[in-house]
Amino acid sequence: MRLDDPATFARTYDDHARSVYAAALRVTQDTAQAQDVVQDVFLRLWRNPQRFDARRGELGSYLRLMARSRALDLWREAQAAGRARDRLTVVEGGRVKARAELDPTRPETALERREGRAAVRVALGELPPAQREALVLAYWGGLTADEIARRTGAPLGTAKSRLRLGLTRLREVLGSDGEAATPLAA
């Protein structure tokens, strides 16, 4: 099959577009995103038809797998964006602070941030060195658990455990509002 031939490619699109769309829609649950995935899958096929190897399986399976992978990427991006949005939302007493209250130039906002940073710095300073290193690399270095494991020479499971234990201990110490609740030496 010559996928770089426009007529063959058009037939391939007609034969497989619906199943590719269905695979994407199952993951994204969004028609617009599923349509984008279909376009992306067939554009990739058009640009690199040699990536499909008929000896490894059917073209339909290959296209549906590409669609599912791309849809999962989009879903993960949306999840990460949602988590980032959640981290940026400051909740006080069950209500979201007004934008004016979040203004970093306001003295009380700057004071709150400075006090929060100081509490976190103190809490981090009292963690075991391995947990502190893992948290610093993850949150300020932007590294994943896998990257932390490679960088520190620790197994992946150990890196993940250090992150989890460090976060758990920080939550215990700082409490839900970010202020010191219990001493770390306990």
Image (cartoon, rainbow, N blue to C red):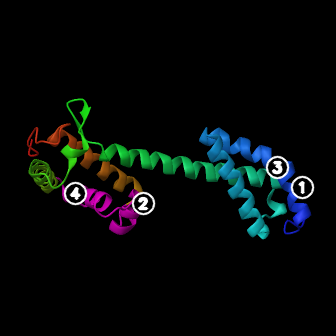
In space, the residues marked 2 and 4 are separated at their CA atoms by 16 Å
Residue picked out by circle 2? 146
Residue contact between numbered discs 4 and 1, judged by CB atoms under 8 Å: no
Q: Give the farthest residue toward the top.
A: 94
In space, the residues marked 1 and 3 are separated at their CA atoms by 9 Å
Q: Residues within 10 Å of mark 4 (few under 14, many from 20)?
A: many
Occupied quadrant, residue 19: top right
Identity, as a three-letter code, of the amino acid under mark 1: Arg
Q: Earlier in the sequence, mark 1 or mark 2?
A: 1
Q: What SS does tag 2 mark?
A: helix
Magenta includes 128?
yes
Residue picked out by circle 3? 16
In space, the residues marked 4 and 1 are separated at their CA atoms by 57 Å
* Position of residue 32 in the picture relative to residue 183 (left or right): right
In space, the residues marked 3 and 2 are separated at their CA atoms by 36 Å
In space, the residues marked 4 and 3 are separated at their CA atoms by 51 Å
Residue picked out by circle 1? 11
* Position of residue 120 in the picture relative to residue 138 (left or right): left
Q: What residue lies at 86% left-to-right and 61% top-to-bottom?
A: 9
Identity, as a three-letter code, of the amino acid under mark 2: Asp
Residue 99 screen position, x and y as percent = 25, 44
In space, the residues marked 1 and 2 are separated at their CA atoms by 43 Å
**Region in magenta:** 126-154
> Which mark is on residue 132?
4
